[in-house]
Image (spheres, rainbow, N blue to C red):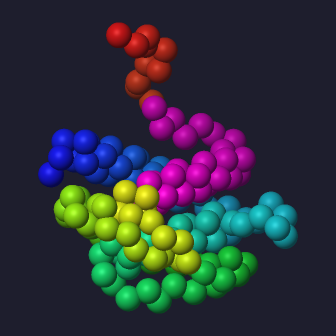
Amino acid sequence: MHPTSQSFLLSSVYRFEESHERIIKCLNVLTDEQILFRPNTVSNSVANIVIHLMGNITQYILSSLGGASDERDRNSEFVPRDHFDRALLTSEVDQVFNKAKETIQSMTEEELLRKRSVQGFYFDGIGIILHVVEHASYHVGQITYLTKMNTDTETNYYGGIDLNVKND
């Protein structure tokens, strides 16, 4: 595999793992009520955002790149919920992210360049991975905001790291 492709895959998996860890961290500090909280009728709860993200990752990575059947019902991801199973939601996050990371890590040069139709769009493997990493990051931002709003605490994602260090 070309070093640039290998670097892309390693960077993608790193960012993907970062999103996974942040979602789990937020789910672990929120109460059930806070996970179901919707700020208004046009906004989603953390539960809805997580369910939506799992649907997106499954469709784009596990189905499109990994060959699993596409069973996604996107509209159902946004239905307001009044209950959920925390253990099941956390387990699904772990399973989907871990399977997606394995799929990304197993990509060959040919598979990275092969174009596919996914959700009505036409992307190569690089475009699909880039979409999913960006999409996960976007929704992690929403989950983080709702977590901070509901708990009035910092997430400390970078706890112990001096982010004021200057570049070499």
The residue drawn where x is 48% and y is 38% is 157
Picture layout, residue 6 above or below residue 162: below
Q: Is residue 29 left or right of residue 48?
A: left
Q: What is the chief secondary structure element of the magenta stretch?
A: helix
User: Which residue occupies the foreground of this view, 74 or 21?
Assistant: 74
Quarter of the rendering containing residue 46: bottom right
Furthest-right residue in this view: 41
Q: Does residue 81 show up magenta in the picture?
A: no
Q: Position of residue 52 (x, y in %)?
A: 58, 71
Q: Which residues are magenta?
A: 129-158
Q: Position of residue 54 (x, y in %)?
A: 48, 71
Q: Quadrant of the C terminus?
A: top left
Q: Is residue 102 left or right of residue 143?
A: left
Q: Is residue 31 left or right of residue 3?
A: right
The residue drawn where x is 47% and y is 20% is 163
Residue 5 seen: yes
User: Which residue occupies the foreground of this view, 106 or 110?
Assistant: 110
